[in-house]
Image (tube, rainbow, N blue to C red):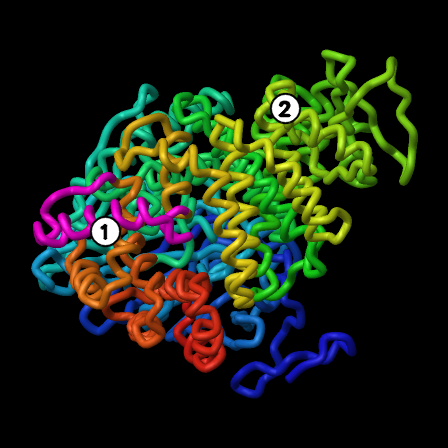
Amino acid sequence: SMTTDSGDAPIASNGQKFPWNKMRLPNRIIPLHYDLLIHPNLTTLSFTGVAKIEVSVKQDTNSIVLHSKYLEITSATIALTQDGIAQHEKAMNVLEFPPYEQIALQSIEPLGAGEKYIININYAANLSDGFYGFYKSSYKTQDGKTRLLASTDFEPTSARMAFPCFDEPSFKANFSVKIRRGSQYIALSNMPMVKSLPIGEGLFEDHFAVSVRMSTYLVAFIVCDFKSVSAITSTGIKVSIYAVPDKWSQTHYALEAAVKLLEFYEHYFNIYFPLPKQDLVAIPDFQSGAMENWGLITYRETALLYDSVTSSASDKLRITMVIGHELAHQWFGNLVTMEWWNDIWLNEGFARYMEFVSVGATYPELQVDDFFLNKCFGAMGSDSMNSSRAISTAAESPTQIQEMFDSMSYEKGACILHMLRNFLTEEVFQSGLVSYLRKYSYGNAKNEDLWNSMANVRLYLSVTKMIFYLWHIPLTYITSSSDRIGRYLLKTKSDTIKLDKEADWVKFNVDMNGYYIVHYEHSGWDALVNLLDQDHTLLSMKDRTHLIHNAFQLVSAGKLSLDRALDLTRYLRHENKTVPVLQGLAYLEVFYKLVEKRSIPDVATNLKRYILEFFKHLIDKQSWSDDGSLSERLLRTNLLEMACDLQYPPCLQKALDLFNKWKNSNGTISLPTDVLEIVYSVGAQRADGWEYLLKKYIQSMSGAEKIKIVNALAATRDPEKLSGLLEIGMEGNVIKLQDLAHVVAAVSRNPVGHLLAWNFVKKNWNKLIEKSVPF
């Protein structure tokens, strides 16, 4: 054990003193270039590696401290280089300090400041069992055979599980990767392959072009037997989508979207994409949604593959958004990287925000801007909890760093950037971004650097700084007597705004462009409730949606009665826009689920009747089809799902008819994708339907369909079947471990299942940790 405070030296695993006592690496040695040779064996599930790292010494030292985790180092040597040519190699002593995932290479002679050396490390390791580092993945073919592959996922601190490295984002270097593989496989890495040499025994060594200067967490390599589809962008970049051979037909939509979005970003950032190719790969076992490795973006299958028979409108939207998110990172994150993980919110918040900007520009018919408010609503929900944290927080250990990747970083970051863009105007925001990306290309930056770039465009520094450091709030408002937006920068805890003329009502936070919640005194809410009742079109759709959200947030905070919030939603009977209806629907459902879970039957029955009467005119208008615009299709799915959930007889009957037709055709007829999950869920209520769906799950080659089937299986009111489903998830064979969290969440949403799910997680907690199940 060790204590850093008293300056005691930590003890290495062999009992000798370890020459460094901090979690962050010293900066006296800087890596310049990594030459990696990686040889995975998919039979023994292990790999060997050689890492040759060229380093530059900034101050005299006897040791080189870098990261290594679960790697068995077999030998290490060092050689002084002159003009890039290594001189005499000398052996180095290797010390390990596992608590900090560090190793120290000790040299007998001191390493001189200003010199360059090449360190040569030979090592071996097992392919990782979980979803991090260089890990093994598998999939089943259409005819039930199991195939293996090996892939990487490094962010934030797992590159050190694949090769010894200076695993911090500011140690950028160039990487030359070579991979050995059998003839039945292909190898992929960040850069295109430049040559492939047969080396005997059916093995090939693939050499990839040297990379641009980049952080270790963005390095990636894959050995697999996938098939691909490719296209060339207008600026000559080769874009390819890779998937398991049986799912090749599901790659085409992603290719179209990736080409459009990549072209959009080159134009928007006014900086060419610096690599000759960009691959997007669907990995069968994947921890998160996707990972933005430079030139080799990896995805969960459901975030990349589109199956026209089973993917719904919302599935297609998600794929488009995730591609937009990861491609934004190629500039913001990869070209310019945060100096340290405490600023990850900028990286993720920005990519989340750019999803809306990029998809809004390339697919205007989707009108994604309408859904942006929801992101801010989500962030505010978690931000108002006691567990909330500041957006930029200190993070030192790998676990603390991992915890930074939460909805706070993504959603709140995005909403704050939206507020800033609204405040500065689009052109100032965009030119500030471009100057930031140009200034820090291939380097690292802190969040102040972005504010300063924005501020330099026009003299906005003081205002930007005030908003971000002092939380001065840029208020906006409209009134009944004015047709322009009032603006006011609130700098003190309380203040009074004088209106030009008398007004019947005032609405603050126009279109919710600001990140704050507004409470109106009694008469203020009365006026807004009346306004919505009399003519809701006097407020914009976003303002109407925002008022509903705002009111229910205040109910949660105990500042407004539930009655008042429900009064506000009364007007929804006349609402014909999807977004406010979905917002009101969501809150009414939350309350219904609450009373249903608490088993307060009479209240539940009354609330159910109220909701169904309330939305009956809309429910009865819905067709069981895939017709209409994106927002009409999302409305259909949500309304019908709720109607069947609330046991509305016409809905149940229609769903059951469709299910029986589908089952009797042995799954050969195709159902409308927007109602697929509803049909499955109603069918799963009967024992034979449930068993049939489980069989279909095993056979299905569509990730989109599998999610819908799991949600349906989790909707049964039979507790034994729910327990069985959780066990199947834990086994990790029929349902992959990557989907276990989804299964648990789906079961816990079921009033019969929420305690089952909770007890299951408690009982299996240690196993879940040990299997590193992504939760």
Decide if residue 541 is in sight here: yes
Marker disc for residue 765: none
480 relative to 67 in the view: left or right: right
Marker disc for residue 429: 2
**Secondary element at image label 2:** helix
Q: Where residue 711 appears, x then y in whole percent?
A: 34, 57
Q: Where residue 507 appears, x then y in whole percent?
A: 74, 27
Depth check: give the residue in front, 181 or 264: 264
465 relative to 349 in the view: left or right: right
241 relative to 524 in the view: left or right: left
Q: Are marks 2 and 1 in contact (CB under 8 Å)?
A: no
Q: Quadrant of residue 671?
A: top left
Q: Is residue 283 magenta-colored?
A: no
Question: Please, what is the three-letter code of the amino acid marked with disc 2?
Answer: Phe
**Secondary element at image label 1:** helix
Bounds of the magenta segment: 643-672
The correct choice, above or below, for 387 with respect to 336 in the image is below
Residue occupying the point 32% across, 46% down? 651
Question: Please, what is the three-letter code of the amino acid marked with disc 1?
Answer: Leu
Q: Main secondary structure of the magenta part?
A: helix
Label 2 to label 1: alpha-carbon separation: 52 Å
Q: Where residue 626 appears, x then y in whole percent?
A: 27, 33
Residue count near mark 2 (Cα–Cα under 10 Å), binned few <14, some 14–19, many ≥20: many
Residue occupying the point 68% across, 40% down? 550
Q: Where residue 471 appears, x then y in whole percent?
A: 80, 39
Q: Quadrant of residue 462?
A: top right
Depth check: give the residue in front, 263 or 444: 263
Q: Is residue 660 magenta-colored?
A: yes
Kindly give the residue lying farthest to the bottom in the view shown.
15
Q: Which residue is mark 1?
A: 656
Residue occupying the point 77% across, 49% down? 559
